[in-house]
Amino acid sequence: MDVISVIRTKRDRKELTPAQIDWVIDAYTNGTVADEQMSALAMAILLNGMTRPEIARWTAAMINSGERMDFSSLTRPTADKHSTGGVGDKITLPLAPLVAACGAAVPQLSGRGLGHTGGTLDKLESIPGWRALLSNAEMLDVLNSTGAVICAAGDGLAPADKKLYALRDVTGTVEAVPLIASSIMSKKIAEGTGSLVLDVKAGSGAFMKTEADARELAETMVGLGNDHGVRTVALLTDMATPLGRTAGNALEVRESVEVLAGGGPADVVELTLALAREMLDAAGLRDADPAKALADGSAMDVWRRMIAAQGGDPDADLPVAREQQIVAAASDGVLTRLDAYDVGVAAWRLGAGRARKEDPVQAAAGVELHAKPGDPVKAGQPLLTLHTDTPDRFDYALEALDSAYDIGPAGAEFSARPIVLDR
Ligand code: URA
């Protein structure tokens, strides 16, 4: 087998054979195929697509590039969720302890933010002492003792994806359904969860801007999961507007704790409960009542134990940014649009996100929203507060917000998009 013939096959819009796929994934993982050759193949896949059988084989080859985790020693059924990423998407933080409080084991391998979308691990690292890196044995220990664990995937899990994802990120080849679906599902299947709920986002703040593209991604991933024996369902959810009232690491932890305390923004609570019901259903725990577990403090109790088991202090004060700047409404009326992508870029520019993998993030940086679409606003009223430790970033962040919102006339008709668009 040689790599040029594999690249030519896809360049010429032909189907890759199972042998070609197995060989190229293995050869890329062990270094025989060079980055420039794999980028040519990734671009050919982005431009020419893959058939479902090709995607299935590509995913299986990525799973086989590393180890598989084994949760068979757990007495509880396992349930996991994965979001395709968005702005203000802190749902994993309240969701994992909530679902654990209802009787499932939740092994939540999460990632860091890159670009305008936030990462669960960056958010949790704003809690003093909390550790994202656990050995497999430590992960199982936390899972056994608290019911939930949120941590980084170990190096042994789908190493082909680790290499390929980093390459796609710098070669303009992220936004391809076959590559996104196989990347996400290879990690989730290798992780060994029994059931999986996918939160596939559609809108300006998501990878998939249109509902049609998000639906194609969701259907592809659900097919891959079920074919590998993981009970998989997907919700299509809105990412045209940021979720909740914060985008940024410590800001989002604070909001998640409010949800666990029985409060928090209505959209975050609604999506957390919708995903919890799906996870519990997929895990066979149909009688569990997640709304009760939020209201009676049992989800909060799991959160506190889970944070402490990973070295964090659940009572510690979270970092607060040194500088704040308010963005005020320009006129009276009704806020009719607040763009998720623009808010995500502003939070990133304020220091909440990173431009390169190795960059540090500011724990306290981000954007706080004082109004959501549908709310009446008055000229001069604060719409957003920008938070950063480095005030020279304000102008750059404000540029991203130039056309981030629309205010319609007072009393204007406004119909909100639902959070859950489809199942
Ligand atoms: N998340 C992943 O893990 N992989 C992708 O390709 C995109 C989002």
Image (cartoon, rainbow, N blue to C red):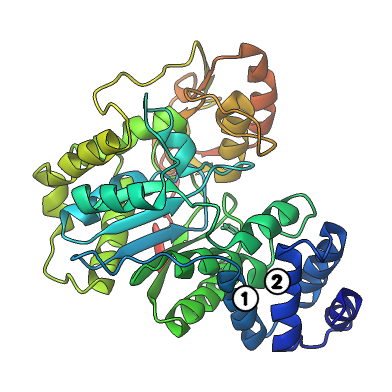
Rendering quarter of residue 263: top left
Q: Is there CB contact under 8 Å for labels 1 and 2?
A: yes
Label 2 SS? helix
Tell me the residue that label 2 is attached to: 26
Foreground residue, 70 or 261? 70
Look at label 2 and name its amino acid.
Asp
Label 1 packing within 10 angstroms: few (<14), some (14-19), many (20+): many
Q: Is residue 107 visible?
A: yes
Look at label 1 and name its amino acid.
Ala
Q: Judge: label 2 CB < 8 Å from ligand 1.
A: no
Q: Residue at x 80, y 54 (%)?
A: 171
Q: Is residue 303 above or below residue 389?
A: below
Tell me the residue that label 1 is attached to: 61
Left/right placement of residue 145 relative to residue 167 reads: left
Which dot marks residue 47? none
How far apart are labels 1 and 2 at the CA level? 8 Å
Residue 372's x, y, as percent? 42, 39
Q: Is residue 331 above or below residue 170?
A: above
Q: Quadrant of the C terminus?
A: bottom left
Q: Residue at x 80, y 72 (%)?
A: 47
Foreground residue, 407 or 194? 194
Q: Residue at x 52, y 58 (%)?
A: 84
